[in-house]
Image: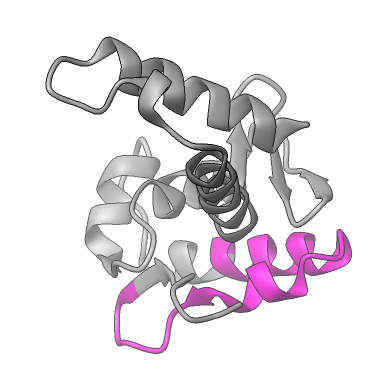
Amino acid sequence: MRVAQLAEEIIAIVSETPGLIPSSSLSATSLARVGSIAETDVRRRPIIDEATFCVHWDGRTCHLGNTLAFRLLERLARRPNQLVHCDVLLHELWDRYTSRDAVRSTVKVLRRKLSTAGMENLALAIDGSTTRHYGLMLAGQF
């Protein structure tokens, strides 16, 4: 059902945007392709719900609450497959000076919560293998 809604929204945007193909010229095959692209994108990217402080991914939900772990995941998910320096995360997420160990600790808590919720693959996608950098590496993972 969600895929169909996304496909309809994409078609509405395409039909309202000058210079793009009008929806009337899209075939049933094109509509199915748009739906499969939307489904793939939804499955590969976690959905961060800021209203409930939950992450939805691969048919599961993890309630993180209004915590640093939630804010960290939200920040990393904004630009998946890109590394973010630890100092940037400290500046953006903490409202006071703290050590880089705080980032490492928060990543550990986030991974544990995601794993407990059955999102082991998403937890493993949080990459910290590059010194002082973290990223949500989703490309080629699934």
Colouring chosen for the image of the structure: one colour
Q: Is residue 91 left or right of residue 102?
A: left
Q: Is residue 130 left or right of residue 7?
A: left
In the picture as drawn, the residue positioned furthest to the top comes out as 16
Q: Quadrant of the N terminus?
A: top right
Q: Is residue 9 left or right of residue 2?
A: left
43 or 104, which is in the foreground? 43
Q: Identify the residue shown where x is 42% and y is 55%.
A: 76
Please say whether residue 130 is one of the residues in the magenta stretch.
Answer: yes
- x, y percentage for residue 115? 80, 69
* Number of numbered discs overlaid on the protein picture: 0
Q: Quadrant of the C terminus?
A: bottom right
In the picture as drawn, the residue positioned furthest to the left comes out as 19
- Residue range (magenta): 106-133
Please say whether residue 55 is one of the residues in the magenta stretch.
Answer: no
- x, y percentage for residue 88? 23, 55
102 or 56, which is in the foreground? 56
70 or 37, which is in the foreground? 37
Q: Is residue 26 left or right of residue 54?
A: left
Q: Which image quadrant is residue 130 in? A: bottom left
Q: Identify the residue shown where x is 33% and y is 16%.
A: 15
Q: Identify the residue shown where x is 72% and y is 24%.
A: 52
- x, y percentage for residue 28? 57, 38
- x, y percentage for residue 14? 32, 23
Q: Identify the residue shown where x is 43% and y is 80%.
A: 128
